[in-house]
């Protein structure tokens, strides 16, 4: 019989799977496609299933592991297959996981390249792997406690294998007894086009900064552009409609603005925002000035009341957006959590296909702490859900205090003995909450006073059932400012 590796509440293995879930930093899997290469008994495929992923595939070469996985999660597509097989039949994936296994590959860079070839354009490859010490580009042979030797990449070798992609070292994973080198978690994504906005008013130094950066960087083969809005608006004439027929509407509109209103960029940008032509203008800029560049510097004033809409428009089109406005971080003090009002829907409920239930009754901020109150149970087995992980967005709340409490009404609803504690209280301190709210979120929250947007503060709650499934409940709340 194969050794028990993954852990479930009803069966402990050599690896603490729930703790590893915490360390891996998987994104929200709801509606995503998920591939687990070397899935073992399917713990993380179970996470994807309970999160309502739209496509889940688990691969492992050990037939016994695959049979156990199928018995736990019969709705998941588990295959007894090598990673050397042709995986193209599965199509692309939003999230691919390769945990604790790459050191078994005969050609590790080739395996990474193969998996990256299956990655959707906005997808993420999550690697958990040992990284050998050393500065060189090498695969170091290391003897393991199991008695065999395996090759482990140095950081430089990993960097080379991921050339052309963006990767981020998330942190160390759960240490295993006998690990010859430390395990790390690495997230890999496709390079996305990035735009940095220098869009403050005139005489704030934006153009001088852009010119300095462009002289220093030059026009690189991998794509560097300056979108000088003054110059673009000077270029636009009615005749450009013939060259860019798909942008005829905005070109003719700007030409009319110049002819009848003003030739000044500040006035034209104001008119573009006022008459709701931002989407058309952004589309034109992308074709006319960016044209596939990986890095663009936007040099041009945008009226403050339309700034968020411009940036959000690029973000929706797949750009990474950086703000470089010198006023972004001035005059906006960090908010104390007691100044925020969290409006989570009372009685918000989530129920999985396996009859796992999570209810959130209230979310309040009092005495400098955020308190979440609710109950969570497996209605099938009439037992409480045992483990909790709390995230704000993608950020884990490391020190959330979780208390179990009595919920007689919940016990009656699922026919559970009254002494079983189904309720929970989750307390997050003011200092911790403050650290979770990023400067960007606070700035957008302040902008919300002018109804420019409705910023959402996302809460993700993970709970585990006794069969190993992990249910993820997601809540969103409007971030508002309490006045007076």
Image (spheres, grey):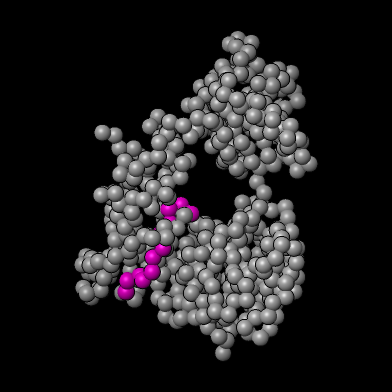
Which residue lies at the image location 61% right of the left edge and 18% below the top edge?
265
**Closer to us: 115 or 355:** 115
Left or right position of 237 against 423:
right
239 left or right, relative to 128: right
Identify the residue at the far top of this view. Answer: 260
Would you say 11 lies left or right of 114 here? Answer: left
Residue occupying image coordinates x 66% and y 42%: 193
Q: Position of residue 364 (x, y in %)?
A: 28, 50
Compared to residue 348, the image places residue 260 above or below, namely: above
Nearest the eye: 96 or 382:
96
Q: Start and end of the magenta stretch?
A: 383-394
> Quick one: quadrant of the C terminus?
top left
Q: Which of the 4 quarters of the picture holds residue 54?
A: bottom right
Q: Residue at x 35, y 65 (%)?
A: 357
Question: In this rendering, does residue 51 appear at all?
Answer: yes
Picture quadrant of residue 385: bottom left
Is 47 above or below relative to 243? below
């Amino acid at each position: 019989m194969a050794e028990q590796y993954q852990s479930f509440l009803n069966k402990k293995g050599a690896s603490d799977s729930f703790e590893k879930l915490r360390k891996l930093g998987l994104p929200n899997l709801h509606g995503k496609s998920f591939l687990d290469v070397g899935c073992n008994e399917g713990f993380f495929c179970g996470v994807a299933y309970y999160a309502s992923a739209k496509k889940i595939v688990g691969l492992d070469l050990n037939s016994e592991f695959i049979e156990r996985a199928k018995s736990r999660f019969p709705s998941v597509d588990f295959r007894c297959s090598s990673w050397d097989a042709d995986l193209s039949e599965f199509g692309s994936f939003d999230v691919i996981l390769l945990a604790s296994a790459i050191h078994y590959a005969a050609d590790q860079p080739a395996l990474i390249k193969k998996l990256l070839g299956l990655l959707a354009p906005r997808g993420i490859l999550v690697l958990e792997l040992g990284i050998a010490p050393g500065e060189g580009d090498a695969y170091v042979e290391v003897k393991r406690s199991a008695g065999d030797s395996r090759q482990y990449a140095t950081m430089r070798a990993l960097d080379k294998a991921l050339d052309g992609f963006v990767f981020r070292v998330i942190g160390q994973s759960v240490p295993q007894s006998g690990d010859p080198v430390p395990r790390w978690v690495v997230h890999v994504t496709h390079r996305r086009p990035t735009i940095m906005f220098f869009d403050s008013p005139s005489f704030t130094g934006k153009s001088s900064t852009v010119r300095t950066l462009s002289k220093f960087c030059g026009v690189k083969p991998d794509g560097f552009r300056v979108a000088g809005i003054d110059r673009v608006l000077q270029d636009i004439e009615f005749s450009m409609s013939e060259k860019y027929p798909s942008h005829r509407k905005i070109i003719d509109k700007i030409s009319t603005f110049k002819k009848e209103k003003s030739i000044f960029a500040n006035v034209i940008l104001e008119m573009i925002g006022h008459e709701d032509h931002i989407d058309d203008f952004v589309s034109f800029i992308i074709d006319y000035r960016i044209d596939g560049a990986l890095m663009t510097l936007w040099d041009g004033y945008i009226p403050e009341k339309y700034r968020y809409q411009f940036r959000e428009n690029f973000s929706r089109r797949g750009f990474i957006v950086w703000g470089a406005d010198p006023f972004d971080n001035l005059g906006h003090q960090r908010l104390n959590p007691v100044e925020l009002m969290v409006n989570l829907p009372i009685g918000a409920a989530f129920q999985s296909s396996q009859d796992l239930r999570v209810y959130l009754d209230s979310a309040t901020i009092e005495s400098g702490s955020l308190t979440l109150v609710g109950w969570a149970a497996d209605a099938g087995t009439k037992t409480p859900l045992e483990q909790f992980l709390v995230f704000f967005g993608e950020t884990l709340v490391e020190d959330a205090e979780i208390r179990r409490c009595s919920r007689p009404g919940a016990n009656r609803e699922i026919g559970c003995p009254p002494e079983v504690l189904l309720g929970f209280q989750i307390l997050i301190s003011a200092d911790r909450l403050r650290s979770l709210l990023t400067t960007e979120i606070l700035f957008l929250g302040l902008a919300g006073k002018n109804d420019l947007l409705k910023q959402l503060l996302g809460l993700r709650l993970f709970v585990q059932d006794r069969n190993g499934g992990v249910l993820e409940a997601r809540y969103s709340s409007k971030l508002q400012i309490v006045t007076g």
